[in-house]
Image: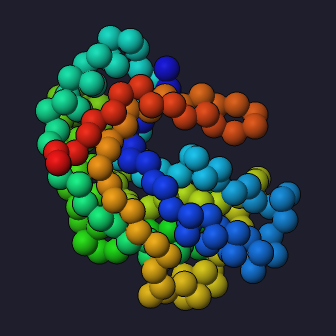
């Protein structure tokens, strides 16, 4: 199965921001596809194709992770690979939330590296909210327009090993295993 480790989010403010950006930018449905709100998440590490045996070993490594619940505030908007040629429009988090999320990601990556898994790129605390269809879109004005604004907050208290099924209509994510924060 195709898999990754992630933290889900549940903020209506992100949906509102997503709609506001699409409306203000005048992008059409041919230009962009909004990420479905039930698919909003922070990818801590992408694992790729894994076997059932890998799944069991990953679960064992995740059990060894201990973290306390923490809050994040959504702030900042940008694009990957650049805002001028964005294939993805994202929303970020406050600096303290990013530090805590990065520490969580790094702990998970370190544990999973013992199984041979490596992060394909450095962790960046962001949620993809819009994807371009085909050609990149120009999202240059978004960074300055939304700089310093906070769009809501979330409490991070679960990490999930997720299965990803790619379909023509969009990806389907399902939780295979959930690690809860210490309370």
Q: Quadrant of residue 65?
A: top left
Q: Say which residue appears at 61% left-offset and 53% top-offset.
A: 37
Q: Nearer the viewer, residue 94 or 106?
A: 94
Q: Is residue 45 visible?
A: no
Image-based side of 165 in relation to 103, left or right: right
Q: Quadrant of residue 59?
A: top left
Looking at the image, the residue that sits furthest to the top is 53
Percent of width and height locating residue 41: 47, 50
Looking at the image, the residue that sits furthest to the front is 183
Q: Say which residue appears at 49% left-offset and 20% top-offset.
A: 1
Image-based side of 73 in relation to 100, left or right: right
Q: Is residue 24 visible?
A: yes
Q: Nearer the viewer, residue 106 or 173?
A: 173
Q: 3 above or below 34?
A: above
Q: Say which residue appears at 53% left-offset and 52% top-offset.
A: 40
**Numbered label tally:** 0
Colour scheme shown: rainbow
Q: Nearer the viewer, residue 5 or 17?
A: 17
Percent of width and height locating residue 164: 54, 31
Q: Quadrant of residue 103?
A: bottom left
Image-based side of 54 in relation to 130, left or right: left
Image-based side of 2 in relation to 68, left or right: right
Q: Say which residue appears at 45% left-offset and 54% top-offset.
A: 9
Q: 53 above or below 32?
A: above
Percent of width and height locating residue 92: 44, 69
């Amino acid at each position: 199965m195709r898999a990754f480790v992630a933290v889900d989010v549940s903020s209506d403010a992100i949906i509102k921001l997503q709609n506001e950006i699409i409306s203000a930018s005048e992008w059409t449905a041919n230009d962009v596809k909004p990420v479905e709100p039930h698919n909003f998440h922070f990818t801590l590490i992408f694992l790729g194709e894994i076997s059932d045996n890998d799944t069991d070993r990953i679960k064992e490594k995740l059990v060894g992770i201990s973290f306390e619940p923490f809050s994040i505030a959504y702030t900042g908007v940008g694009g990957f690979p650049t805002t001028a040629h964005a294939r993805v429009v994202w929303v970020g988090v406050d600096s303290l939330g990013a530090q805590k999320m990065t520490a969580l990601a790094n702990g998970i990556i370190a544990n999973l590296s013992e199984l041979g898994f490596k992060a394909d790129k450095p962790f960046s605390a962001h949620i993809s909210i819009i994807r371009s269809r085909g050609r990149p879109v120009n999202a240059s004005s978004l960074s300055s327009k939304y700089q310093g604004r906070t769009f809501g907050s979330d409490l991070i208290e679960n990490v999930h090993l997720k299965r990803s099924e790619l379909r023509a209509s969009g990806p389907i994510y399902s939780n295979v295993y959930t690690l809860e924060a210490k309370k």
